[in-house]
Image (spheres, rainbow, N blue to C red):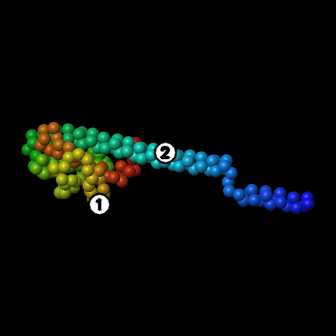
Amino acid sequence: FEALATSLGQCHRMHRSLAPWSLRGRLVAIALLVCSATLLAGGAAMHRADEIADTHLLDARLVELAKMGLVFAEHEIEEAFAEGTANAIQETAETFASRYHYQIRSVGGTLLLRSHNASASAPIRPIAERGFGQAVVDGESVRTYAEAGRKGGMVIVMAERMRERRDSMGEV
């Protein structure tokens, strides 16, 4: 009889170890799953928020460079008119390195001034468009910003390579 009781006890213990999880085990598993999902979702949301903030900062820098370029261009073009060389397309030195391209055109589309690395023939984007946009320059995708000058006679199109924007995202 004792041997039978011992065997039954061993069978019962084996059955308990093979039985479904206890309530405590299930609650711990659910808590771990919820915490892991929350951490992953929070991390993804923070990464996206950081990307958006970086994009806003890089766009603000593009706007400021365009405004600065217009002020510079108005001065350069006034000098060119005073010297009688206003008909020649002017190319500026390596002011913004290779990261930025810009073209300054008259409202009629005539190229007045350009960066050393911008095309002398093809516009970066249509002259009538203002604000932010996308374009392809030398086979590379660029983020653009276009703004008219204070006097309304010229438009600057500033372009930044998307590859370099992505590379600097974490730095900002």
Image quadrant assignment for residue 95: top left
Q: Secondary structure at mark 1?
A: loop
Q: Name the spot of residue 55 as percent of width and height, x first.
A: 35, 45
Gap in angstroms between the C-alphas marked 1 and 2: 37 Å
Q: On the image, numbered disc 2 is attached to which residue? A: 42
The answer to which quarter of the image holds residue 66 is top left
Give the residue displayed 24% in from the left and 39% down from the top.
68
Residue closer to the observer: 93 or 165: 165
Q: Which residue is mark 1?
A: 139
> What residue occupies the far front of the structure in this picture?
1
Residue at figure coordinates x 46%, y 48% from the top left = 44
Residue 1 vs 75, above or below: the answer is below
Upstream in the sequence, badge 1 or badge 2?
2
**Quick one: SS at disc 2?**
helix
Measured as percent of width and height from the top left, residue 76 is found at: 16, 41
Q: Identify the image quadrant of the N terminus.
A: bottom right
Residue type at mark 1 is: Gly
Query: Is there any visible trace of residue 93 in the rendered image?
Result: no
